[in-house]
Image (spheres, rainbow, N blue to C red):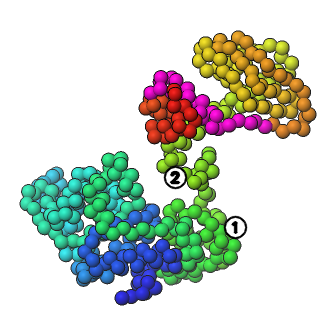
Amino acid sequence: MDSIEEIKRRFGIVGNDPMLERAIDTAVQVAPIQLSVLIIGESGSGKESFPQIIHQYSQRKHKPYVAVNCGAIPEGTIDSELFGHEKGSFTGALADRKGYFEEANTGTIFLDEIGELPLATQAKLLRVLEKGEYMKVGSSQVRKTDVRIVAATNVDLEKAIQNGKFREDLFYRLNGILIRIPPLRNRVDDIPALFHKFTNDFADKNKMPAVSLTHAARERLKSYDWPGNVRQLKNIAEQITVLAGSREVDEVELLQYIPEPKSQSLLPQLQNSGGSHEQFNNEREILYKVLFDMRRDMNDLKKLVMDMANGQGHISDENQQILQRLYTVDEGMTLTHQNTQLTSSGTHISHTPHILSGNGEHVSDIQVSEIGEDTEAESVFSIPDNEKELIRKALEKYKGRRRAAAQELGISERTLYRKIDAYGLNDL
């Protein structure tokens, strides 16, 4: 059997990343075995090379190989494209037509973007996998086909199953052998070699000199995230080959062709925390709500302090409304707001504790004093305390009904129960 290096040369695969070589090795090992293969990887990562490896190293290598992009076929014609149709079966069906499964009989069919198939077509594909049977559109005659199915997708099929968009039984039938293709950002050391291949291939094809990169430009190329993967790198390499002012491209010129990175998340540290991505999605909304509320409260407090520091001897109607919002919970209730300090140039306000009655008419223990002008503004507050308060309010509002409270907070019931235990709110 050919070595990994020979296979890479034969199919134009560039790179020495261990995950990439493992995927190639898996494709070669499974090729002689009559199992369905599912290839998963991000769009543009190079999935299309692996069905060809499987076909060429199988016993069907001298038989037909048919590649179908399921995502590019309109839903109304997908059945006709895959299984064929009879003359007169629908408007425009002027003659019998063979489908891809009939064309690929005894060979291999590659179904790219399998996650885009409609549910009705998925059921028909399942029948092909289980019994090797299908029917043309407009026909009641059962036909047989003997094909090796290799499928690929950039969709999370397990999540699609949960959302009712993909059949679970079809997933398990397709997933005889799973091959994962790594994204380009996980193959950093392969990026310069890929760029070199793409620019040289394009230059040879168009009879023009190729370009090279300075060391700094290569490092910059490696540091980019490449959301479009190998396909995006190839596109940029070809653009540079045509448009670069010099045949040796430096970092400054390279940056003209690389898109700006996407803006960072409001809370990027949450994405890098030890918790799972699913947990982040469940709790994100409540954290955003807490932080936005706290930011608004601090801005209002600053305004209130500055008004008082400017010599206003009474609390204006606007500031009275601010105080009511910051320090009241429900009508007739009293809230003690503790451990908040605000320091700004020339003024200091502290309240540990201070109390405002439910109707907002009386404020006690607010102290304003002069401080040095060089003091920086700072605010001290606790995210867990605010989160606990939001959960408590929601539980009281819905009289302890967990499901309603979870919907109000925008989190799952499971997350809410965990928060209730963590904050000791089981009695509510």
Q: Which mark is residue 276?
A: 2
Magenta segment includes 168: no
Residue found 49% across the figure and 66% down from its top: 183
Q: Where does residue 31 sit, x and y in percent of width and height?
A: 31, 78
For residue 23, above or below residue 406: below
Residue on which the image places disc 1 = 252
Q: Which mark is residue 419?
A: none
- Which residues are the magenta region? 378-401
Secondary-structure class at tag 2: loop
Q: Is residue 245 visible?
A: no
For residue 332, above or below residue 202: above
Residue found 23% across the figure and 51% down from its top: 120
Question: Which of the two discs, 2 and 1, labels the residue nearer the N terminus?
Answer: 1
Q: Where does residue 201 sit, x and y in percent of width and height?
A: 50, 80
Magenta segment includes 389: yes
| Quarter holding residue 168 | bottom left
Q: Left or right of 228: which side holds 304?
A: right
Q: Is residue 379 visible?
A: yes
**How would you classify the magenta stretch by its main secondary structure?**
helix
Residue nearest the observer in this picture, 116 or 330: 330
Q: Left or right of 113: which side holds 33?
A: left
Distance from the alpha carbon under mark 2 to that under mark 1 = 38 Å
Picture quarter with the N terminus: bottom left
Residue nearest the observer in this picture, 40 or 176: 176
Q: Left or right of 57: which side holds 388?
A: right
Look at label 1 and name its amino acid. Val
Residue found 36% across the figure and 51% down from its top: 160
Q: Where does residue 26 sit, x and y in percent of width and height?
A: 38, 76
Q: Where does residue 285 sit, x and y in percent of width and height?
A: 54, 39
